[in-house]
Amino acid sequence: MNLPNNPPVNPPVNPPGSPPVLIQVCASADLTDGGKGARFALRTRSGQASGFVVRYQGVVRGWLNQCAHVPMELDWQEGVFFDDSGLYLICATHGAMYEPDSGRCAGGPCRGGRLWPIAVIEQQGSIYWQPDDKLLAPAESEPAAPG
């Protein structure tokens, strides 16, 4: 899936008046600030893909696991998205660096690109992601009841 350099934040896909569709990713305690992230399966209109969540400055952020430079997954070791300093997300293949709070390119070959955001919610000790009109739940996922 080729993504634009400045992706919009897509509205979640929910019928009016219905509760949001939330899909559990991991326990809140699984994410530490600037530490290992958690991957999860999703679909795009082009096919299967993955997303990830990380914690940065106390806030959980969700991103499509695809470099803006070349459409490859960022982590070469599962869940390792931060550089050694824990300050930037880094593509293990080409070294593109991204700001964890905005997804904007911070250096390397991504020049002006950014990561595609995923709506995430942290509640009752768990992290959930919310499908939208571009990023869809994998066919085998069962939505979690909002709490």
Image: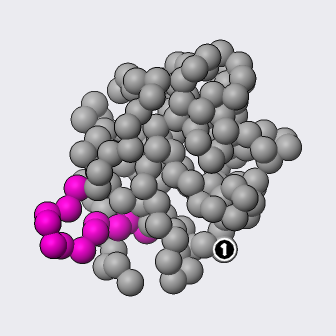
Q: Tally the numbered discs.
A: 1
Instruction: Tell me the amino acid under the disc marked 1.
Output: Ala
Residue 35, x across and y down, in percent: 75, 55
Secondary structure under tag 1 reads helix
Q: Residue furthest right?
A: 85
Q: Nearer the viewer, residue 30 or 111?
A: 111
Q: Residue at x 14, y 66 (%)?
A: 16
User: Is residue 19 located in the magenta-colored stretch of the structure?
Assistant: yes
Q: Is residue 78 visible?
A: no
Q: Nearer the viewer, residue 141 or 34?
A: 34
Which residue shows up at 80% across the image and 47% down it?
Answer: 86
The answer, for residue 2, to whether it is visible in the render is yes
From which residue to which does the magenta span run? Answer: 13-24
**If the image is split into quadrants, where does the C terminus sit?**
bottom left
Residue at label 1? 29
Q: Main secondary structure of the magenta part?
A: loop
Residue drawn at 29 percent across, 55 percent down: 12
User: Is 1 or 11 nearer to us in this picture?
Assistant: 11
Residue 119 at what x, y percent from top left?
42, 55
Dividing the image into 4 quarters, which one contains the N terminus? top left
For residue 91, side relative to residue 115 (left or right)? right
**Residue at coordinates 46% horizontally, 37% vertically from top-left?**
116
Percent from the top left, x then y, of residue 77?
68, 42
Q: Is residue 92 above or below residue 77?
A: above
Would you say residue 32 sits in the magenta stretch? no
Residue 35 versus residue 31 in the image, above or below: above
